Image (cartoon, coloured by chain):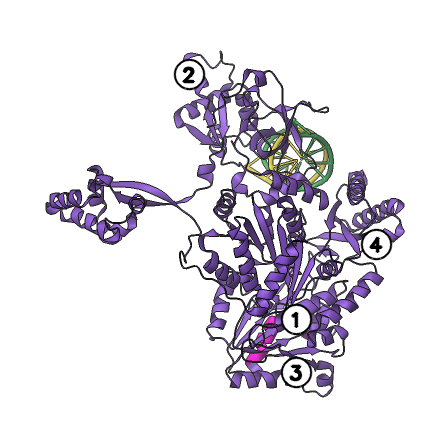
Chain colours: A purple, B yellow, C green
Amino acid sequence: MLDFNQTTDFQEKETFFADVILPVPIPGTFTYRLPFALNGMPAAGMRVVVPFGKRVQTGIVLRIHQRPPEKHQAKYILELLDDKPTVNTQQLRLWEWAADYYMCSLGEMMIAALPSGLKISSLSRIQIHPDFALRLEEETPEALGLNDKETRLLQALHQNDNLTFSEAAEILDLQNIYTILKSLIAKQAIIIFEEIQEKYKPKTLKKLRLAAQFLTAETLADLLQDLDKRPKQQEAVLKYISALPLHLSPEAHRNGLPKSIFTEAGISDSALKTLLKNGIFEEFSAIVPRFADQDTGVLATVTLSPTQAKACADIEQLFTQKDTVLLHGITGSGKTEMYIHLISRVLESGSQVLFLLPEIALTAQIVERLRKVFGKQLGVYHSKFSDNERVEIWKGVAEGRFSVVVGARSAVWLPFSHLGLVVVDEEHEGAYKQFEPAPRYNARDLSMVLASLFRAKVLLGSATPSLESYYLAKQGRYGLVEALQRYGSASLPEIRMVDTRLEKKQKTMKGTFSSVMLQEMQRSLDKHEQIILFQNRRGYAPHLSCDDCGTIPQCTNCSVSLTYHLYSKELRCHYCGYREDPPTNCRVCGSDQIKHVGFGTEKIEDELNLYLPTAVVQRMDLDTTRTRTGHQDIIRDFADKKTDVLVGTQMVSKGLDFDNVRLVGVFDVDRMLYFPDFRSHERTFQLVTQVSGRAGRRETVGLVLIQTGNPQHPILQHIAEHDYHTFYQNEIVERERYGYPPFTRMIRLTSKSEDLQLCVAAAHDLAEKLRRTLGAARVLGPEAPVIEKIRNQYLREVWIKLEREGINLRQTKTFIAQTATEIEKQSKYKSVRIIADVDPA
DNA sequence: AGCACGCCGACT
DNA sequence: GTCGGCGTGCTC
């Protein structure tokens, strides 16, 4: 427990308040009064326990002041959990910035940014107040003003030392114990505390060491002599000495040996116990980091090619003038080596580095590389980690144990204290944007805000930069370095269009495969080269259709057709997870003529068995990688050449480097190209270029076949010619002409309700209200999104386009938020929710 | 987000 | 007659 007795008389006379952030999606902070005993102690970023409604919450102090709240009577802070801030000042500023920019509450920020292991929960414990325990023995409950339940709980606490909230609830047979706790707290009868040490359990290891007195040659010899008649104990001592010879440093002996070494060597527990009892061995436990480094000591270095060295020098040079540099480096130009080089340089200067990846699970190869170079200094962080793991990394960063953190987007929330560089790899990736829930932030953009808080630098890297980033680089806002050569002798793959319209006319298609595709695949198989096939759609067929009446089975909760999955033999909704058995007869007309329409990865896999029966095919998509090790196994098998053909969704486009792949096949590119979204061209260019990069590394020249009905489409031509610049030039002109980002900022407001009429009406009213102030040109819609109902919620979108310059963004957003709230508050729209998404992906 | 209060259906 | 459904209103 903390020592509360260090306050001065001067402070005790004054009344202080704390604005506290609570993990609830309500705007603003909550003001609590400090008990005099806490005067002078809480500071911004420290955790406090406060009563909130009928319950108790962990909050983060945002500021301390002396202004009493006007509307409410302030309640008292119950406990202070920290003696130094859990959330540092830069983090708090980042939270405030992000809440403001992304139009969410600070509470939502806290939920997203703080690992729940640092929040109290039902695991928080209650203890009897030591002073009260005495009074309880001396006075009657009535004299102490206790009711029946309070007495019962206090008696239980008296016997049990401490209880969790849930245990207390059980004892009292009540679901709601907060009223009682509150009253007991008020009577100073109990203390609530959070055992962080318990909730976040470090992994410990039982270890043994030889007592210091035996660490000289003579005393050790005497000891062994003494143990002559106790062979097991002697063996144990010998075991110890052979593992840790006497001449080692005292430090090494203090670190001892894991107890398991002895038990595994067949030395019984009882022998060890005797040694402990006699003071020959000492037992202690050591905390093992959960992410023990497998490659300790053997830290690799990188060698840069002259081109890479030049690019790195250019980047460092640009960093003297710009805060952000964009590295446009094609696949195979060795961006990772450059990152490692630059990170090492920053580490030498004593600063921390954050390395962001769009999806860490898919890029295990990069993490391995980094671990080899940075060893124990490297922390890995993403939202799939368990809470204990996350708390461990959080603390490691706060304590400076991890000077390099590689992580997915949530890693921007870690408690850096002296950040020097943020690397954002594959900066164009949509995965940097969080969709659900709030805060709907983009970690790439936030990394620049984060960096500015530390005067740190940001390096954006991509083979296919986002239009936004490239535009800003061209404008001179970012530095720009282009590395457009592949490393060593590797050359760019040949990219060829296969005209499926023509092949269909000539009737040379076999299922989803063009004859050209099958021929090239056969050629590759003959040469024992591997193949990657890319189809950005999972399942067997995206929908079923009755041949007689055209009925398509739909999801009952969403406005989408159900995808047929061959392996699980079911129809599945990819939005809500709804499943049903595929019908043998049409629900509407009873016809048994039901056909599959379209194709997904499963169908490609299935057809391969027919057309290339000798090939070993593996599929990699959400369905085959659900298990923790799923994709690792698939990747390993492919790397070990146990698999000939890898069929997959965008998963196959990321971070996989295999040197035996000559051929990459891309299916159904037209669907991506014609997707109704202003970014569809950009996305297609990025995705196809990325998957093309998997073809032909090192000595072989790769071949990429793209099946399309529009081989002349300009985007496909730019892809084929590896011509990012022309693609960019054409696309940026379009963006400017139609007023899309980067020339404008977009905010998407989604009206959401179970009731279609209300959803539509609310969206309409919202758009009207916004138009009245912002003007018709800035407000688009409302319109139904492509999928107008998800999980039984109807959706309507209003898009707001704001100029990049000459507009007060903060003021405008405040106005938008107010308007949305006004709509939500109208009693007729009680079931409508309006969701704001700033810079939607 | 929780959690309680409050007003309408099927049950010991 | 109650138990319990989830609508809605509030939380410093």
Instruction: Quote the CA–CA distance across marks 4 and 3.
Output: 41 Å
Image quarter (top left, top right, bottom left or bottom right) of the C terminus of chain A: bottom right
Mark 1–mark 2 distance (CA, rounded to whole Å)? 75 Å
Q: For label 4, count other residues whose C-alpha is less than 10 Å away and answer few (under 14), some (14-19) or many (20+).
A: some
When asked about the image quadrant of residue A730, the answer is bottom right
The kind of residue tagged 2 is: Leu
Local secondary structure at mark 3:
loop
Helix, strand or loop status at disc 4: strand
Q: Earlier in the sequence, mark 1 or mark 3?
A: 3
Instruction: Return the disc, 3 or 2, that comes first in the chain's sequence.
Output: 2
Amino acid beneath label 4: Gly
Chain ID of residue with mark 4: A
Horizontal relation, residue A125 to residue A333: left or right? left
Which kind of residue does numbered mark 1 sit on? Thr
- Same chain for the residues under marks 1 and 4 in the image: yes
Considering depth in this image, is A823 or A218 the residue closer to the camera? A218
Query: Label 3 belongs to which residue?
Result: A514
- Label 1 resides on the chain identified as A
What segment carries the magenta color? A588-609
In percent of width and height, residue A825 lies at: 78, 38
Q: Please give the residue where the numbered disc 2 appears in the rendered image.
A: A134
Relative to residue A115, is residue A178 depicted above or below? above
Give the number of the mark in front: 1 or 4: 1
Q: Which residue is mark 4?
A: A781
From the viewer's side, name the closer residue of A474 and A502: A474
Q: Where A321 falls versus A491 (above or below)?
A: above
Within 10 angstroms of label 3, few (less than 14), some, or many (20 or more) residues? Answer: many
Q: Earlier in the sequence, mark 1 or mark 4?
A: 1
Q: Is residue A518 magenta?
A: no
Q: Residue at x 76, y 58 (%)?
A: A475
